[in-house]
Image (cartoon, rainbow, N blue to C red):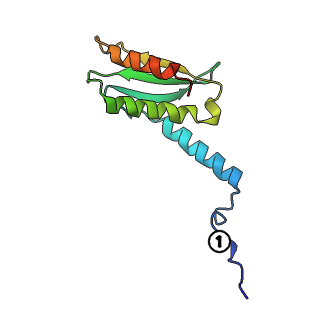
Amino acid sequence: GLQPLPAAGRAGASDGLDAEQRLAQREAEAYQSLLQCRDVGFATIELRPRGGFPGHEVYMVAKDAPWDEYGMLALFSFLDQVMGLARVREGFVFVYDVRDYMRPQADVFSDLMSWMADPC
């Protein structure tokens, strides 16, 4: 008759982790990835831990580069990933630092406000 595969041959069994542990590992990897500064064209953005409530901030720094649709999509994708993290469920502070850029682009503010107001 058929013999069962050895544990090392079963999908997911070779790492010795159960489904809950694998999910926690993926969450930790996603979190670490979001702590890295990303360039979205018109700004850089990163997730930062902070003391107090809420325990995280999304920190965005304006650059002297034109706003474009691809940059906004990258920004919204980043924010969606942040909001999908279990450890950020209590919320986060959003900081948009425009100190080094004397002409902040109004389109960025408008698009961010529209995105934040969307209940989906």
- The residue at which mark 1 appears reads as 8
What x and y, as percent, mark residue 73?
39, 32
Quadrant housing residue 69: top left
Vertical arrangement, residue 6 with respect to residue 112, above or below: below
Residue 41 place in picture, x, y as percent: 31, 30
Q: How many marks?
A: 1
Q: Is residue 45 above or below residue 98?
A: below
Q: Is residue 8 left or right of residue 103?
A: right
User: Does dot 1 land on a helix, a strand or a loop?
Assistant: helix
Q: Residues within 10 Å of mark 1 (few under 14, many from 20)?
A: few
Residue at position x 69%, y 51% in the image: 21
In the figure, 98 relative to 16: above or below? Answer: above
Q: Residue at x 52, y 27 (%)?
A: 48
Q: Identify the amino acid type marked 1.
A: Ala
State the image quarter where residue 37 is shown: top left
Where is residue 25 drawn, in percent x and y? 62, 48
Q: Horizontally, is 102 left or right of 84 in the view?
A: left
